[in-house]
Amino acid sequence: MATCNIISWNIRGLNSKFKRSLLFSYLKKYTPSMVLLQETHLVGQKVLSLKRAWVGWAYHASFTTHSRGVTILIRKNTPFELTQLITDHYGRFIILACL
């Protein structure tokens, strides 16, 4: 059976390129299967800055201002099949139903 490592992190904003760099340095060191980020504060196309080569799936819920926001990043080699996705229009939660 495969091991699934999950990191959950209240990041308190990722609009700074420096903070995103620190985040990805940490994730490179620990190589999680899944990353759950809270308070990303990303709006619009800024969520695309979280896509990396190792990311197979990325799910986001954001708000219209630089507040709230959640993201789920799932590594490419993680066995994963999405059956249902529910996102909050206020950027407070994401629900993934998967196999």
Image (tube, rainbow, N blue to C red):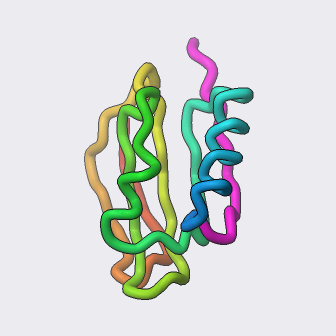
Furthest residue in direction top, as rendered: 1
Assess whether residue 73 is covered by the magenta stretch.
Answer: no
Front residue of 48/63: it is 48
| Location of residue 47 by image quarter | bottom left
Q: What stretch is highlighted in magenta?
A: 1-13
Q: Is residue 68 above or below residue 29?
A: below
Please give the name of the residue rendered at 35% of the width and 69% of the height, measured from the top-left corner. 87
| Total number of numbered discs in the rendering | 0
Q: Residue placed at 55% from the left, 39% from the top?
A: 34
Task: Indicate whether residue 9 is drawn in magenta.
Answer: yes
Spot occupied by residue 74 in the image (x, y as percentages of width and height) = 46, 37
- On-image quarter of the N terminus: top right
- Placement of 67 over or under 72, stated as above or below: below
Q: Residue furthest left?
A: 83
Q: In this view, does 56 lie to the left or right of 22?
A: left
Rendering coords of residue 82 (x, y %): 30, 42
Q: Residue at x 46, y 49 (%)?
A: 50
- Vertical placement of residue 92 versus 34, above or below: below
Q: Which residue is drawn at 72% across and 29% down?
A: 30
Q: Quadrant of the C terminus?
A: top left
The secondary structure that dominates the magenta segment is loop
On the image, the x and y values in percent for residue 67 come to 54, 83
**Residue 43 appears at what percent x and percent y?**
40, 74
